[in-house]
Image (cartoon, helix red, strand yellow):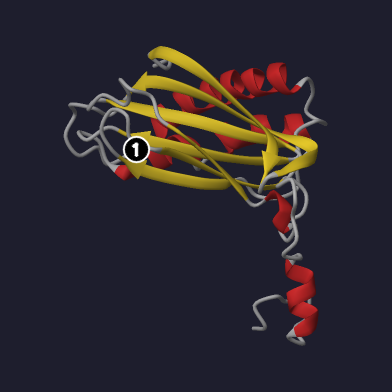
Amino acid sequence: MAASIRKTLLHVETTLIEGGKAAPQPLVMIAAAAVLKNPWAGRGFVEDLRPEISEVAPELGALLTGMILERAGSGEAVEGYGKSAVVGTDGEVEHASALIHTLRFGNHYRHAVGAKSYLAFCNTRGPANAPIMIPLMDKNDGGRRSHYLTIQMAIPDAPAADEIVVALGASIGGRPHHRIGDRYQDLQELGHDAENPAAV
């Protein structure tokens, strides 16, 4: 079963001024989204989601990664990254999770941008025009707070009750006037080992 994609969307936001001060480097945030038929819609409770995951997730991963790279110009240009899915009201949050929480989806993006960090994520259920939130973090450094960002957007007619919106997000740059330090500074000040940040 290939993905039944109704439409795709590319969202680009460029921040030139933040806090009344010009950005030293404009922050560009990119989101690529696909609206598709929920492959489990209308089937009642489906015990094994794996067949559809194996069929649909790789196709979505490749498609959305390609859209991000085309706008960013290269995988190297991408600094922050993340993923999100919103399932329509007839579906389960598990359906949204199924399509993005698999290496068959995420590895397309991870490999294309040369990332080491895990993909920050959000998975929710909602009606058409529901907020689509894509949290971002530095692709190579989970403690780099300048790249803790969130892309927020909505699609007026999606997801329909039997659809899922799946999205990838990217940033070129971090918050323009980052000045709250990074996790490592906190760890040092609190006397924690940077190699064991939870102090367990």
Q: Residue at x 58, y 18 (%)?
A: 63
As drawn, is 43 to the left or to the right of 56? left
* Residue 95 rendering spot, x and y as whole percentages: 34, 38
- Quadrant of the image occupied by residue 87: top left
Residue lying at the far bottom in this picture: please name it: 191
Residue 195 visible in rendering: no
- The foreground one among 152 and 35 is 152
As drawn, is 120 to the left or to the right of 46? right
Does residue 11 lie above or below 110 as drawn? above
Circle 1 packing at 10 Å, graded few (<14), some (14-19), many (20+), is many
Residue 159 visible in rendering: yes
- Quadrant of the image occupied by residue 194: bottom right
* Residue 61 rendering spot, x and y as whole percentages: 57, 26
Q: Residue at x 78, y 70 (%)?
A: 184
Residue lying at the far front in this picture: please name it: 20
- The foreground one among 82 and 1 is 82
- The foreground one among 132 and 89 is 132
